[in-house]
Image (tube, rainbow, N blue to C red):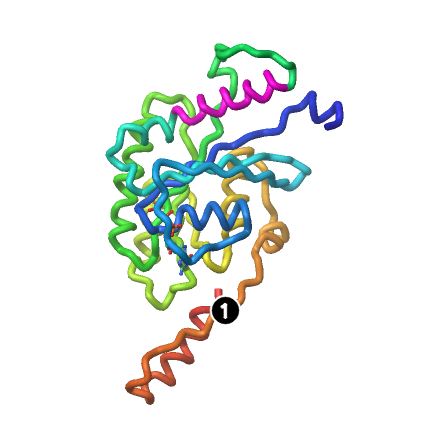
């Protein structure tokens, strides 16, 4: 590590990913952090943690800590701590690294938590083919509001409609999504963890907003991956109607 890097520690942002079970939170985090996707559903128990370093325009290096919270945690005791207290855990983690570096061996180091500015983003994820997962976003958001009501700085809130590769199965109207964003001053994102469509862009835009970095059109276009479209197969019956429908779906499936 160079001297200049040592003097200026890299910025760290915390991204908490919330939403109903099977909305695709783990898939989203895995797609972003590891550029991978698994078709098999494996329920997240408690939380998973991912780290990814990105560079924003102006050579701003930033590390994103992605906290993937299990969909079953709503109503549980730990959720508040994940949304708010997670910052404390991270500071302890930083201390451990420092201890190792300095060959120190203290069990506990007291840290003034307020010294580190809170850079928190909350991603409210729902599945565009699952109306209930959209309705429940309200419950997840209520937890975020309650936990942060006394906080001086409010998190960046992002509404993320996932599974846009399944556009032909969409049940949540875009209007409703946009209304939520308007009413709650949240940013709006549509992504597919499966194809990777707009996933990096979503994280990049939020990080840029938190750090007040402007993204121009060219940079946004650069972040949009070219996505391979899948052809949607319809059942054999009603051939006449199907030939028109499958034609349309080919167009619809291209993101
Ligand atoms: N077609 C499609 N399937 C997806 C997408 N994202 C996730 N899935 C699938 O949806 C299922 C649930 O995905 P997960 O990422 O495990 O969902 P989760 O929100 O983390 O679920 P919990 O761990 O229960 O909170 C898996 O079978 C994924 O393969 C997507 O963008 N498109």
**Which quadrant does the N terminus fall into?**
top right
For the residue pair 132 and 181, the one nearer the viewer reads as 132
- State the extent of the magenta-drawn residues as a range: 85-100
For the residue pair 78 and 115, the one nearer the viewer reads as 78
Find residue 193 and report its horizontal and vertical position in percent: 46, 54
Question: Picture quarter containing residue 105?
Answer: top right
In this orientation, does residue 186 appear?
no
In this orientation, does residue 134 appear?
yes
Residue at image coords 50%, 12%: 107
Q: How many discs appear?
A: 1
Residue at image coords 52%, 53%: 36
Residue at image coords 42%, 36%: 16
* Residue count near mark 1 (Cα–Cα under 10 Å), binned few <14, some 14–19, many ≥20: some
Q: Looking at the image, is 56 positioned above or below residue 86?
A: below
- Classified by dominant secondary structure, the portion drawn in magenta counts as helix
Question: Picture quarter containing residue 123?
Answer: top left
Task: Report helix, strand or loop for mark 1.
Answer: loop
For the residue pair 203 and 91, the one nearer the viewer reads as 91
Find residue 235 and report its horizontal and vertical position in percent: 32, 80
95 within the magenta span:
yes
Residue at image coords 47%, 16%: 114
Find residue 217 and report its horizontal and vertical position in percent: 60, 52
Find residue 202 and report its horizontal and vertical position in percent: 49, 47
Q: Which residue does the numbered mark 1 point to in the structure image? A: 229
């Amino acid at each position: 590590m160079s001297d200049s890097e040592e003097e200026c520690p890299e910025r760290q942002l915390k991204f908490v990913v919330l939403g109903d079970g099977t909305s695709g939170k783990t898939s989203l985090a895995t797609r972003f952090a590891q550029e991978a996707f698994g078709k098999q559903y494996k329920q997240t128990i408690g939380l998973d943690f991912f780290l990814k370093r990105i560079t924003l325009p102006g050579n701003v290096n930033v590390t994103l800590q992605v906290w993937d919270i299990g969909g079953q945690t709503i109503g549980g005791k730990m959720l508040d701590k994940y949304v708010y207290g997670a910052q404390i855990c991270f500071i302890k983690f930083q201390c451990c690294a420092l201890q190792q570096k300095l060959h120190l061996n203290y069990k506990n180091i007291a840290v003034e938590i307020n010294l580190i500015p809170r850079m928190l983003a909350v991603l409210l994820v729902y599945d565009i083919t699952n109306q209930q997962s959209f309705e429940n976003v309200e419950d997840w958001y209520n937890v975020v509001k309650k936990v942060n009501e006394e906080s001086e700085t409010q998190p960046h809130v992002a509404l993320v409609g996932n599974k846009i590769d399944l556009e032909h199965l969409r049940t949540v109207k875009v209007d409703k999504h946009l209304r939520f964003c308007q009413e709650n001053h949240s940013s709006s994102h549509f992504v597919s963890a499966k194809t990777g469509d707009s996933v990096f862009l979503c994280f990049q835009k939020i990080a840029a907003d938190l750090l007040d970095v402007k993204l121009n059109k060219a940079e946004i276009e650069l972040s949009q991956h070219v996505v391979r479209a899948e052809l949607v197969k319809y059942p054999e019956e009603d051939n006449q109607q199907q030939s028109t429908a499958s034609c349309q779906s080919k167009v619809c499936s291209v993101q």
